[in-house]
Amino acid sequence: EAGVVQSPRYKIIEKKQPVAFWCNPISGHNTLYWYRQNLGQGPELLIRYENEEAVDDSQLPKDRFSAERLKGVDSTLKIQPAELGDSAVYLCASSFMAGGGSYNEQFFGPGTRLTVL
Amino acid sequence: KQEVTQIPAALSVPEGENLVLNCSFTDSAIYNLQWFRQDPGKGLTSLLLIQSSQREQTSGRLNASLDKSSGRSTLYIAASQPGDSATYLCAVSTYDMRFGAGTRLTVKP
């Protein structure tokens, strides 16, 4: 069974340029997460989707970050314009959440390492 | 706001030692706690998931315990091997998932 797929694996851009990351979750998983991980720290949640709906985007810097999950499967995270402080690893994860709000095991993709020059 | 702390930040042990990694959290109203392993430049690999109603989970040489009332979890690694060298992260699920900063483990041959 394929795991969570992310692309690209690496991206180097100049500040003020746009960038987009793509994620394909594990088949059948209804919940998708985007995290940002800075060096030496744990991942921080940016946005969580349940099917097509963004149910938690409180940590997403909405002035420059946007995300979408059309048809409740693949997702794209975009930054426009990128800033130097956006350099980090962007991780996508997925899980299957049954009714009742109980969170199940999350599976992570390999991440996209973004460097903003 | 849930705060997750992992101690120690780094640990170096000789091969064969048994070791314990610690995780503490401030809000005991959790759904579950998950332990992950992260190798350099890689994503996170799930090791063990403990639901809030459980006290421990075991997988091979790994054993994770959960004490919700005191806000603590431990990951026990038996007979450590050089291949266990990685960063170990714990994550707590309430409404969202909060991670600790991790413990960087080095097992020396």
Image: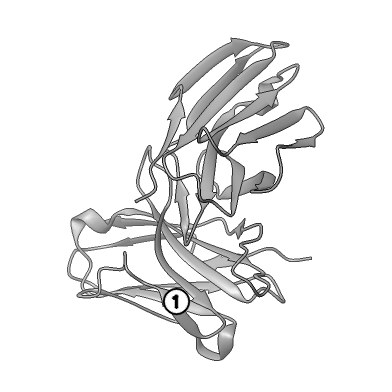
Is residue B34 toward the left or the right of residue B5 in the image?
right
Q: Residues within 10 Å of mark 1 (few under 14, many from 20)?
A: few
Residue depicted at 70% across the width and 37% down the height: B55
The residue most toward the right is B60
Note whether A69 is above or below A16 in the view shown.
below
Residue depicted at 44% across the width and 76% down the height: A55
Residue receiving disc 1: A55
Quarter placement of the N terminus of chain A: bottom right
Using the rendered view, name the quadrant where residue A36 is placed.
Answer: bottom left
Residue type of the residue flagged with mark 1: Val
Residue A32 coordinates in the image, percent (x, y): 54, 71
Colour style of the rendered protein structure: one colour
Q: Secondary structure at mark 1?
A: strand
Residue depicted at 59% across the width and 82% down the height: A73
Camera-side residue of A64 and A50: A50
Taking the image as drawn, is residue A117 in sight?
no
Residue A81 coordinates in the image, percent (x, y): 20, 73
Camera-side residue of A87 and A104: A104
Note whether A101 is above or below B60 in the view shown.
below
Quarter placement of the C terminus of chain A: bottom left
Residue B50 coordinates in the image, percent (x, y): 68, 45
Residue depicted at 54% across the width and 37% down the height: B69
Is residue B85 toward the left or the right of residue B29 in the image?
right
Taking the image as drawn, is residue B108 in sight?
yes
How many labels were placed on the picture? 1
Letter of the chain that mark 1 sits on in the rendering: A
The residue most toward the bottom is A71
Camera-side residue of B71 and A26: B71
Is residue A43 toward the left or the right of residue B52 in the image?
left
